[in-house]
Image (cartoon, coloured by chain):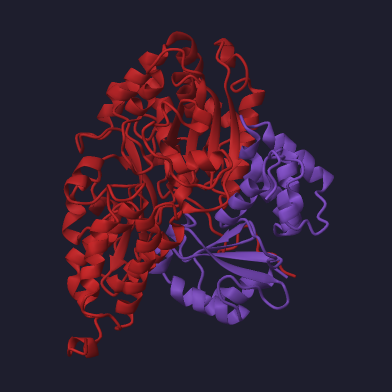
Chain colours: A red, B purple
Amino acid sequence: MTVIPNNSRLRYRCQLRQNADERRANTHPLTWRMHDDGTRVGFEEYCAKDGYQSIKHTLTQRTRADIIDTMKQANVRGRGGGGFSAGVKWSLTQVGDHLPRGYLICNADEMEPGTFKDRLLLEQLPHLLIEGMIIAGYANNSRYGYIFLRGEYVEAARSVALAIEEARQAGLLGDNIAGSGFDFNIALHTGAGRYICGEETALINSLEGKRANPRAKPPFPGQSGAWGKPTVVNNVETLCNVPAVMQHGADWYLGLSGGRSTDSGTKLYGASGLVERPGLWELPIGTSGQEILDRAGGMREGHTLKAWLPGGGSTSFLLPEHLELPMDFDTIGKHGSRMGTGLIAVVSHRQSMVSLLRNLEQFFARESCGWCTPCRDGLPWTAKILQALEHGEGKPEYIDILEQHTLGLNSPRTFCAHAPGAMMPLESALKLFRAEFEAGIASTSLEGVN
Amino acid sequence: MSQSPVSHSTPTSLIATDGFQLHEDDRRAILVERDHYEQPQAACIEALKIVQKRHGWVPDGAIVAIADTLGIGPGAVAGVATFYSLIFRQPVGRHVILLCDSSSCFLTGYEELSAALSERLGISFGQTTKDGRFTLLPVCCLGACDRGPALMIGEDTFGPLAASDLDELLEAYP
């Protein structure tokens, strides 16, 4: 028996593609503490690098309303893909009198196709997340925090579990944190698969030990979430932004984009697909797709860019001409797509769009929770039609049927955003690359056999 | 149907128990998990994973044993066990291969790798090799897109992989 050594080229290692000399505390709040070699930053090193500095002051000197105001002023928008204002989400837990103490859930169920950013933060800098969660827990009057981590992130689970224990031993979790009178604990909850768990209400059901079907909104989780208590669900990267916002203030955070965007802060951007050097970079929000692609070394030799997904499988395709746009929530939204998670996936001119769409829709069909009919039945139908077109066995009406699905599987006809997300790449591909789909219609049926 | 009130302690008649005995360590671990949550049902996914870690999969009897340990109905546990893709309700091989089939791996050589792996193992998705060594399953985007195509064997993640790497890789999992 041979064992694959830890340093084997075969083993996957998550690594940032920016050296330490580029990463500074005042410009790279998410990654400046990380090591070039990708090893984990432990508790003592995190503390020595200014870690947990904001805790005592924030928990003893600032009110919950004041913290939420700062989050709103800083315009911290959800990094899980939705781009919703974290401050506004948090303010829901303040509405109403005598609300019970609730829950803070970190959504670490990273499964969006093409997305590998939260893995980096969880594996290499877990204390930044813990610090962000303590502040968020305080601001939202949460009694308990959960890190909902996908089961496949084994290394991240080890890293986070150790960080929770280190923080507990240092008195940063538990009763009366740093003498503030605030009690808060965090538990690691690892999942057992299924993409739909990333949807925040499905995630709450999964946390409660149920099938991960989404819940109707309202009530919004901020008012009634886990076990009916006020619950805030934030993405890993969103929570990792919180400590620096508290430490340096909203104005500093607003300035990080350097005028590139009306959005604020930095973003973990990435590139995958047939690029020379796929990877991750922390860059000012509003950095252009072109700069991200340039950092990735451009397309691999022999490949030309045909289209790209700006931030996951549930975003619309963009064209090479859109690379000049700033990658932020509003700009990409205005051009018919979504920034999503901000990790771009490039499509080579050699890639069949029909095959790629077949792959995407098979994924979404498999991952439908089955709760509502349009999604449960429509997505497999879409995938089958695409499979027929891929093999040149399509019927003339198939393109129309696909277009009908992009309407029928869209808001407000579905229970959650799963099917509408699945329709974004399909709708855009039908518009941009229609001829490729038409080429999949069997020649016999074009001759009028029907 | 009996009209008797719902009982959590004797709901076992409809599901075979197959003489399944919950290991005492597992029972204790499940009770520790239970205390992390406001209600015991929340621990059932972790309980299924605890049982699966010991047995490789989740037999029917384990569903009842978990339900009894947590004081919830077996239907709730069974419903959860069939929903989640990483809970196995039938026996699997000694090593489970989770092959990422999402878009970034698809763009970087998934199909070639998948075909080579299936041929090498003589099985397709959802099947186990005759010698009980490997089970092959597809998995949601593994978050290893910068090094696709990627896969997991057990708890180890690998990528980028070419068909020519498979001999070296599989040899390490006897």
Q: Is residue A99 left or right of residue A435?
A: right
Image quarter where the C terminus of chain A lies is bottom left
Total numbered circles: 0
- Expressed as whole percent of the image width and height from the top left, the position of residue A413 reads 29, 50
At 41% from the left edge and 15% from the top edge, which residue is drawn? A64
Q: Above or below — where is B158 with respect to A72? A: below
- Expressed as whole percent of the image width and height from the top left, the position of residue A163 reads 60, 34
Image quarter where the N terminus of chain A lies is bottom right
The foreground one among A349 and A209 is A209
Q: In this view, does B89 lie to the left or right of A136?
A: right
At 23% from the left edge and 51% from the top edge, which residue is drawn? A337
- Expressed as whole percent of the image width and height from the top left, the position of residue B35 reads 68, 31
- Expressed as whole percent of the image width and height from the top left, the position of residue A233 reads 44, 34
Residue A371 visible: yes
The foreground one among A442 and A29 is A442
Q: In this view, does A412 lie to the left or right of B55?
A: left
Q: Above or below — where is A15 with respect to A203? A: below
Q: Quadrant of residue B110?
A: bottom left
The foreground one among A235 and A3 is A235
At 68% from the left edge and 37% from the top edge, which residue is drawn? B33
Residue A308 visible: no
Q: In which quarter of the image is residue A178?
A: top right
